[in-house]
């Protein structure tokens, strides 16, 4: 169903976007702590991203279990592979967030620009629609987006039950 089709990828997107926004503002939000105690400031970014991912990973598992209980044809036996696919997403999020957190301390408007860019990226990633609906001439541009690959692989694993490592990582 469309609910399962969208939910399988929407929740990881929420992990990414919330981790990015929380981590990007973590240094500025803890400015008093940063001024008083000497410690690596990037730990604030890592903690914010990890916290968002941990919280939403639990929610993601709960959503998948509820969808399965409601009769959706999900392959819950592939959950370890799903977690394996979420690791690169977390690493991408940490890397981008570290750069944006540094920019955010210098330029306060970075957060507003990133919010708009996240909305554009959301619709540029096949979350609410299948990649097959995208015209062939635009698929090359969509392949540049690493979240497109993540979305397609998550659907492949959870909805189709693919356990072939050659296709999951491709």
Image (cartoon, rainbow, N blue to C red):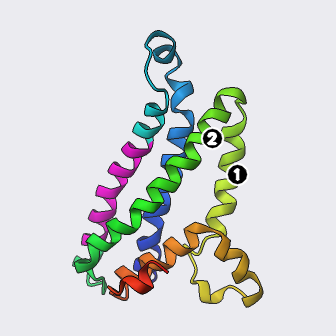
Q: Residues within 10 Å of mark 1 (few under 14, many from 20)?
A: few
> Picture coordinates of residue 24 (x, y %)?
56, 38
Q: Nearer the viewer, residue 127 or 144?
A: 144
Q: Residues within 10 Å of mark 2 (few under 14, many from 20)?
A: many
Q: Which mark is residue 100?
A: 2
- Pick the residue in front: 161 or 55: 161
Do we see residue 71 in this rendering?
Answer: yes
Quadrant hosting residue 120: bottom right
Residue 26's place in the image compared with 14, above or below, is above
Q: Residue at x 58, y 80 (%)?
A: 129
In this rendering, position of residue 25 left or right of residue 57: right
Identify the secondary structure beneath mark 1: helix
**Numbered disc 2: secondary structure:** helix
Asked which quadrant contains residue 149, the reply is bottom right
Q: Which residues are magenta?
A: 49-66
Q: Which residue is mark 1?
A: 116
Query: Is residue 1 something one can see in this rendering?
Result: no
Specify whether residue 57 is painted magenta: yes
128 in magenta: no
Nearer the viewer's eye, disc 1 or disc 2? 2
Q: Main secondary structure of the magenta part?
A: helix
In the picture, measured across the screen, residue 83 lies left or right of residue 130, that is: left
Q: Residue at x 50, y 81 (%)?
A: 170
**Placement of the N terminus among the 4 image quadrants:** bottom left
Measure the C-alpha gap from mark 1 to mark 2. 14 Å
Residue 98 point in image, percent of width and height: 56, 40
């Amino acid at each position: 169903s469309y609910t399962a089709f969208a939910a399988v990828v929407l929740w990881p997107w929420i992990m990414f976007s919330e981790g990015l926004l929380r981590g990007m503002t973590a240094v500025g939000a803890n400015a008093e702590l940063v001024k008083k105690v000497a410690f690596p400031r990037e730990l604030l970014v890592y903690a914010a991203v990890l916290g968002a991912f941990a919280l939403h990973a639990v929610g993601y598992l709960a959503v998948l279990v509820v969808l399965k209980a409601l009769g959706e044809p999900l392959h819950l036996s592939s959950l370890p592979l799903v977690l394996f696919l979420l690791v690169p997403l977390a690493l991408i999020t940490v890397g981008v967030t570290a750069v944006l957190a540094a920019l955010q301390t210098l330029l306060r408007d970075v957060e507003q620009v990133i919010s708009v860019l996240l909305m554009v990226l959301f619709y540029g990633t096949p979350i609410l629609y299948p990649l097959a609906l995208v015209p062939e001439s635009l698929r090359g541009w969509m392949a540049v987006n690493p979240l497109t690959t993540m979305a397609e692989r998550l659907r492949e694993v959870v909805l189709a039950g693919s356990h072939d490592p050659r296709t999951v990582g491709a």
